Amino acid sequence: MRDRAVRRGYDNVDLDACTNRDVAVYITPGGVVRPMAESIVLFVLALSHNLVSKDRLLRAGRWPESTRPLGRGPRDRVIGTVGLGNIAREAVRLLRNFGVARFLAFDPFVSKEHAHELGVSLTSLDELMHESDYVLVNCPLTPETRGLIGAREIAAMRPSAFLINTARGRIVNEKALIEALESRRIAGAALDVFETEPLPADSPLNKLENTILTSHSVGWTEELFRDMGRSDCEGALAVSHGEPPPNVVNREVLERPGFRRKLDGYRAWRETQA
């Protein structure tokens, strides 16, 4: 999933329609990598130290009870990532500082040599689900990944394991995940994304104590929007000079005569302004 790692923020865009109308769709992956990787680390640590449950108990006036749950850090644990794209690689880099024992990844688009350079062992999805103390969902939503983590995969997780999804909700079978959380077959989950967004008020997830839920915005920081805006402007400037913008995802449009004529028109206009 490395080659498709950037294809995660535009699954509601009809790329074929854009291509057929000579419209290039470009994205700004550089702006989201660090904030989202930091958010993954945030979830790992918050789950590890029972942060949310301790906060809830304390606010409810249950001080003694809030001191009893023992946390367990990521040190000497196994972290597995489903997808080894830009965000996952940055998350691995950051999490390495916490003394993680092993990093596993399932990604059919990444070579073993490249994963080895990152200090990550490629493995099957089944092995990753079974061996990981933390399962990080970092792949794009595609027809191949829709429902990729279903009831069978969740059942393979350790009872002490956590699932963290900051990618897309429909990659994980939400019903199966809820059942596993309700029955404590897994320790907990941190979810920034859901099958239906906004999350319905009557979702069982809202009642679960072993979850952390955020509104598909955990990575929204000043830096994220600053860097995305900068990349947007750089792409627009490139087009104004008659050049294709960086990070075009429907790359076949770049060879279409209609799109080339558009760039030629911008280039000719720019020359008249020189």
Image: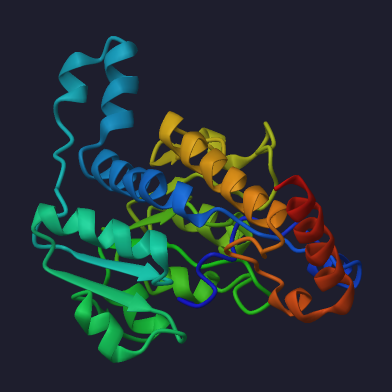
Q: State the residue at coordinates (45%, 40%).
A: 219
Q: Judge whether 224 appears above or below 64 on screen.
A: below
Q: State the residue at coordinates (22%, 53%).
A: 94
Asked whether 236 or 65 is in front, the reply is 236
Q: Judge whether 251 appears above or below 7 on screen.
A: below
Q: Which colour scheme is used?
A: rainbow
Q: Residue lying farthest bottom? A: 112
Q: Residue lying farthest top? A: 61
- The x and y percentages for residue 133 are 25, 63
The quadrant holding residue 266 is bottom right
Q: Tell me if I can see residue 105 in this picture.
A: yes
Side (left or right) of 52 relative to 65: right
The quadrant holding residue 135 is bottom left
- The x and y percentages for residue 241 are 68, 56
- The x and y percentages for residue 106 are 39, 79
Q: State the residue at coordinates (22%, 71%).
A: 103
